[in-house]
Image (tube, coloured by chain):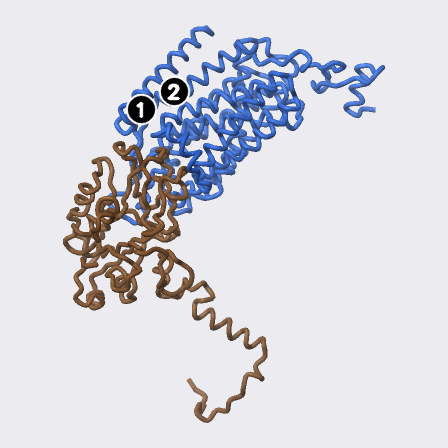
Amino acid sequence: MKFPNINLDNLKNEGTASVTEKERRKFLKLGLAICGVYAGGKILSLNSLVATAQASGGGSDLVKKYPYNPHYSMVIRQSMCIDCEKCVDACNKTNHVPEYGYRTRILTKKYTGTLDRQVEFIPVLCNHCNSPACVRACPTVATYKDPVTGIVRMDSKRCIGCKTCILACPYDARYFDANRHAIDKCDFCWEERLSKGETQTACSSACPTGARTFGNLTDPDNIVFKLVHQIEEQVWVLRPSDDTKPNIFYMKGNMRSVDNILKGQKFKTT
Amino acid sequence: MYKFVMGILAITALAGAAVGVHGFFVGYHHVYGVTKQIPWGLLISTYIFCVVTSTGLCIISSIGHVFGGEAFMPIAKRAVFMSIMFMLGGFCIIFFDIENPFRMAIWNVISPNFSSNMWWMGTLYGAYLVFMIIEYYFLLDQNHSLSRLMGFLGLVVGIAAHSNLGGIFGMLHGRPFWYGPYLPIYFIFSAAMSGGCAILFFTCLGWKINPEIMNQRMERAIKAITQVTIFLISTIIFFTIWKIVTGMVSEGKHLIIMSFLTGDYAINFWVFEVFLGMILPLFLLFKSQGKNYNLILTATGLMMVGIFFMRYDIVIPGQMESVYHSLGVVEESSLLPYTPSFHEIMASVFGLAFIGFVYLAGEKMLNGHQLEKHEIVPEGGYICPGCGAVHYMEEGESVEDAMKRHHKIW
């Protein structure tokens, strides 16, 4: 192939006067399409998943502002979960969950024909979405988004037990508790721990491997912030198409890059 | 026979209520078949069956006494009466499904969530019931302009309430089988079909109880409603075909659609929903030509059973696929099971037996919902031998002249 020999250093500046408006528009359009801005920044932007997932939304960049403070969130490092179920036991005990219900559980995903792992465990719980479908569905405002912490909480006395929220929730995070006479769900241990001064949920403090990391997404020093705001390892959320802007983030979490980011910070500190 | 059936229905309703109350006190989670992942069961589907029929009766009867469709007028009283009773029956059933029904009365009022379909459902159906009761009062009171106004308001609120019921399902993001504008639209057409079916069924049954209710105008009404019902069944067949065809290529619906076609719900779908609910009644109603009341009674009776399954096939299958199914996890790889428990069946039977009982009582106590003499043939009018409608003679006109004038025969 023959390349034209252009001496860039000696080129004369032609100015913009000679560029027609049509040409200018064409050029800008091309630039927009390439940058991904044209498509709302969702198609080409590397960080799009995190941005879609997070609350404050808008824009294609990593979101640095969050609507709550502390903006409680959990990052689940999937590869570290060993299905010991200590988190489930701790949750049941702390929050008095009856045997027919659950606030959190661990799902199993099996693979065949893979070289490294044949099984993966996926802890699931309430995603404390920023656009919670359950809150919209509740006829009596018995479930609501806490204006300070962003935790999706229950006001049990208002619950009429219509069970619409159970079906509205895309994360299967709700059940009817006959003892409370109301729907029960994960509240990031607000009632039993956080409101009493603790900084960790029962599940995250019971986790022996650090698969569940709980913290404040508004604090740049927080482990949760650090895990979400790195680009080396992919971070995703479950069922992003439901557009509920969940606050539980998932990643494999076993790469050295993550360790470097944490710089020796213990996974359970806040 | 009449008293015997009344007695059976009364005992069944009481037994159903007793079992329901027992469930209420021991706790529903001990006695109901619903689970954490399938929280809406038989009670919700029976409730929907009742309110769909109620709205449908309102829609069909409004053609006559709200919009002036002459042929539909004679069914108004029975239709509005049954519409109220189906609504009450539905409320009886949902009372046993809502875990804290007494809280509902308080918090729905003092803590409303205007963006919740469920809140609107309670409010709109409440308003609908009030309008229908006032309308019925004016119908009995012979105040036709006010009953017409109330009928119109009842219709508007009823349509809003009922499409909103479809909206409850249609606005649940995580449930692809329900999600979208299909159900609110389907619910309205489906209600009209149920209404046509129900009024044919209850009128022909009323004719069995008291043959006197059939007169020339009623015969004409039956014929007209049969025609409308045939049209509406065809519409629902069209809806059903497209639900299946589009569902087969949708990732979120495919499993459920296949369970209709070849899986656990195949009998529900093919035998009850399609054959008893649509194909057979369509054929029988055609065959009856709107004149053979025994055939209409059989057709619509079977259709009511089919429609019951249609509602069940909306509510339960929508929940069968777990929200985590698409994640490919072992726990949620298959469809979730649900079987109605004895308590759920009895609580549903309570509502249905109540409707049956008040229907029978109404047929006798309200004189077969017959119109007053002057409503059938008002002063100065006569029944046209040609079309069966009421015509009015002008002064000095003969019957024949009036008919010619009405039908523009010169």
- Please, what secondary structure does the residue beneath circle 1 have? helix
Residue bearing the label numbered 1: B24
Look at the image and tell me in which quarter the N terminus of chain B lies.
top left
Residue at 55% x, 16% y: name it.
Answer: B203
**Residue B180 image label:** none
Rendering colour (chain A): brown
* Chain coloured blue: B
Left or right, B174 with respect to A191, comes to right
Circle 1 chain: B
Instruction: Tell me where residue A54 sits by quadrant.
Output: bottom left
Image vertical order of residue B299 relative to residue B182, above or below:
above
Left or right, B86 with respect to B16, comes to right
**Residue B349 image label:** 2
Q: Residue B146 in the image: x percent, y percent? A: 64, 24
Look at the image and tell me in which quarter the C terminus of chain B lies.
top right
Left or right, A130 with respect to B157, comes to left
Q: Residue B297 in the image: x percent, y percent? A: 52, 17
Q: In the image shown, does B219 or A188 lie closer to the viewer?
A: A188
Left or right, A182 with respect to B86, comes to left
Residue at 28% x, 26% y: name it.
Answer: B27
- Please, what secondary structure does the residue beneath circle 2 have? helix
- Residue at the bottom extreme, as displayed: A10
Does residue B244 appear anywhere in the picture?
A: no
Which of discs 1 and 2 lies nearer the camera? The answer is: 1
